Amino acid sequence: MNDLIHRPILPLGQRPKLIELAQVGKVFNGQVTALRDMALTVNAGDFISLLGPSGCGKSTALRLIAGLSTPTQGRILWEGGQGAGDLGVVFQEPTLMPWATVAQNVYLPFRLRGQSFPSVKGEIDEALALVGLSAFAEAYPRELSGGMKMRVSIARALVTNPRLILMDEPFAALDEITRHKLNTDLLALREKIGCTVIFVTHSVFESVFLSDRIVVMAARPGRVIEEVLVTAPYPRDEVFRTSADYAAHCQVASQALHRAMGDAT
Amino acid sequence: MSDALLDPEEARRLRGKRVERVAKWALPVVVLVVLLVLWDRLIVWYEIPHYLLPGPGRVIETLVKDWAMLFEAFLVTLQITLLALAVAVIGGVGLAVLFNQSRFAEMSFYPYAVILQVTPVVAIAPLIFIYVENRTVGLLLCAWIVAFFPILSNTTLGLNSTDHNLRDLFRIYGASRWQRLRYLQLPSALPYFLGGLRIAGGLSLIGAIVAEYVAGTGGIGSGLAFRILEAGYRLNIPRMFAALLLIAVTGVVIFAGLSFLSHMLLRRWHESALKRDS
Ligand SMILES: Nc1ncnc2c1ncn2[C@@H]1O[C@H](COP(=O)(O)OP(=O)(O)OP(=O)(O)O)[C@@H](O)[C@H]1O
Ligand SMILES: [Mg+2]
């Protein structure tokens, strides 16, 4: 069971560039400026949170990176081009196919690439093991709790060994206990496979706990206001959550968010 | 489970469930028996002659006596009904997929599908039998016109009701149009299709019966509707009742069969097949 590659995570500042957003803008219907002049360099190994009030273009930015919509201005460049399976996505809802078992759901990215189930069984088993759901491979989504469904969604996102995983408020609909647990598990996962993550959230606390870079955004028009670095070392766990370091970072991020919201009104 | 674990409320709920399970079957049977007895008694009390209204006993008697003829007619009607249903499934699903894949095809033809649906089949049937030589084909066509629309409209609805996040996911993973149809849209549409199928099952029986009435010619290969017409001319009321009984049983069996099929296909994953307490 060693099908998923482990990529080492280098310290901030030494990471190779993965994706570059150059002055990216999106205007809907020629009138609504959802995003203006977004410049962001995503490096391999980054855990970036997009933090900002509702309507500041976080989801729009994510959809642009995912290639689900095209920028009105600017460009998005993948270093070395984007290959098949380079991208995994987790939405706010688990977005599972209710008619398929957990294993079949995780198999989806391979199925759409024309690979047979037996040929990727190893990857699927390992992805399920990583999210702690090996015992539920043959279960149907409706038999799982909300948190477990989200885990399946995460397993599906990382099963192709993507260079980048996009997550749009994945835990927003879950209760706090489950959310904390999933946050901790997500970090452990990242530590294990070394993937790069862009994570959208409304929560200052969640963004500080998870990320090493917090991109703070403001609305009307959606734009990046500033970037906050969280220098606390990984692995982070429940101890970090109660540390003074954590509290200090939360305060910095919170103030940045207030500046962003003040800007907007 | 030990009874010690049941508080009074739970015990009451369990008892209620047990009663309900029996009542679901027992009550309709009781109603049936009461009605049959009442029917039988009324005929005796008011001395109604059997050529006006036969008693239930006589209807059964006729059913047994005319079984050979009625059963043959039943097979004919059943065959038309099932064939029409099969063609309705192929036509309905085929058109739904076509409309879903091509907006222009939908814009062009959907209005005519609606017109075909809203025009009463009794009005179209005589024309069909003028232009279509083969009687079976004519019957099939009539039954199909009635039955295909619920399948078309339900399947169309289902194909368009896919989760938009799943759609995005398929796009991200570079799914082809065919893959999206096969792995996303068709499974999403299955519950809708099965709902349409249940309606279409009943409608194709109605379509077959109505078409037989209109076609009206008898001889070899005539169905139950024609037997009713024929018995009506001869004032053979008991046989009319017996044939009617067979038609009703056919409808119920078709509905039950399709419901069972639907349950088997959806029971693992769909909410409609989910059993919940309370
Ligand atoms: N398809 C669209 N058509 C028109 N306007 C859109 C579209 N998608 C987003 N917008 C607008 O663009 C702006 C940014 O939307 P976006 O969904 O990116 O915000 P968000 O930061 O994700 O908000 P939330 O936190 O509520 O999810 C909003 O004003 C929204 O109304
Ligand atoms: Mg959003």
Image (tube, grey):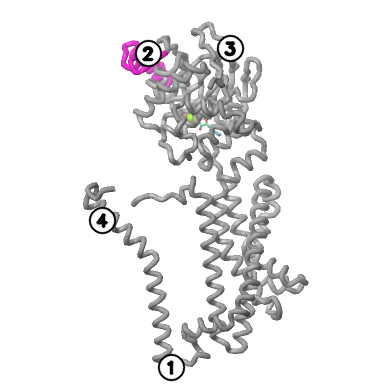
Cα–Cα gap, marks 1 and 3: 99 Å
Camera-near label (2 vs 1) is 1
Q: Main secondary structure of the magenta part?
A: helix
Residue at 58% from the left image edge and 31% from the top image edge: A28
Q: Secondary structure at mark 4?
A: helix
Q: Callout 3: residue from which chain?
A: A
Residue B217 screen position, x and y as percent: 70, 80
Q: Residues within 10 Å of mark 1 (few under 14, many from 20)?
A: few
Q: In this picture, is B93 found above or below A97?
A: below
Q: Callout 2: residue from which chain?
A: A
At label 2, which amino acid type do we have? Answer: His
Cα–Cα gap, marks 3 and 4: 67 Å
Cα–Cα gap, marks 2 and 4: 56 Å
Magenta run includes residue A237: yes
Ligand 1 lies under 8 Å from the Cβ of mark 1: no
Q: Which residue is mark 1?
A: B47
Which label sits on residue A249?
Answer: 2
Q: Quadrant of residue A86?
A: top right
Q: Secondary structure at mark 3?
A: strand
Residue at 59% from the left image edge and 47% from the top image edge: B159
Q: Which residue is mark 3?
A: A17
Which label sits on residue B12?
Answer: 4
